[in-house]
């Protein structure tokens, strides 16, 4: 579970998801996306980012770029934290453009 948070809300959401996964019997690390250097040893990845000015946080965008090939080979989920971005307008224009992640 990796998160990119400025004021802490997204980190809290990541911790809450992590708690639910642990309650379901999973072993979970919850870490700042900017501090994750290697995905080796993880069976699945969740990435969450706060949204500011319609863009994901830089740490999340870097995480996606840096780990793109590893993410293409494991189960991968994302969530976005930001109340003013509706699902219909959630086009990742600040984040995933140009990245191909196969699922
Ligand atoms: C200056 C500013 C810009 C924001 N821009 C957006 C935005 O473009 N889209 C959105 O959905 N939320 C936007 N938000 C709301 C934040 O993304 C939201 O409060 C988020 O949960 C903050 O996460 P954090 O506490 O982890 O930093 C903005 C908030 C601020 C203060």
Image: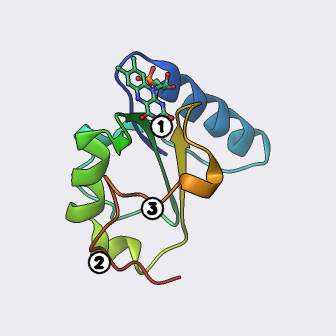
Q: Residue at x 45, y 61 (%)?
A: 42
Q: Nearer the viewer, residue 30 or 63?
A: 63
> In the image, 24: left or right of 86?
right
Q: Could you tell me residue 97's position as x and y percent?
A: 31, 67
Q: Closer to the camera: disc 2 or disc 3?
A: 2
Structure colour scheme? rainbow
Q: Determine whether the beta carbon of the residue marked 1 sits less than 8 angstroms from the nearest atom of ligand 1.
A: no
Q: Position of residue 77 (x, y in %)?
A: 55, 60
Q: Earlier in the sequence, mark 2 or mark 1?
A: 1
Instruction: Say if mark 2 contacts mark 3, CB within 8 Å.
Output: no
Between the C-alphas of marks 3 and 1, the distance is 12 Å
Q: Nearer the viewer, residue 38 or 68?
A: 68
Q: Earlier in the sequence, mark 2 or mark 3?
A: 3
Q: Is residue 4 left or right of residue 103?
A: left
Element assignment for label 2? helix
Q: Secondary structure at mark 1?
A: loop
Going from N to C along the chain, the mark reached first, 3 or 1, is: 1
Q: Which residue is mark 3?
A: 42
Circle 3 packing at 10 Å, graded few (<14), some (14-19), many (20+), is few
Determine the residue located farthest toward the front in the rendered image: 89
Write the residue at 27% across / 46% down: 36
Real-space CA distance between mark 2 and mark 3, rounded to the nearest whole angstrom = 14 Å
Residue with the mark numbered 1: 30
């Amino acid at each position: 579970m990796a998160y990119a948070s400025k004021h802490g809300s997204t980190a809290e959401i990541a911790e809450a998801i992590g708690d639910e996964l642990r309650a379901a019997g999973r072993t979970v690390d919850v870490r700042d996306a900017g501090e994750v250097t290697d995905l080796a040893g993880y069976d699945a990845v969740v990435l969450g980012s706060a949204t500011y000015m319609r863009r994901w946080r830089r740490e999340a965008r870097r995480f996606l770029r840096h780990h793109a090939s590893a993410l293409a080979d494991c189960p991968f989920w994302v969530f976005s934290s930001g109340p003013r971005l509706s699902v219909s307008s959630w086009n990742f224009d600040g984040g995933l453009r140009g990245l191909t992640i196969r699922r």
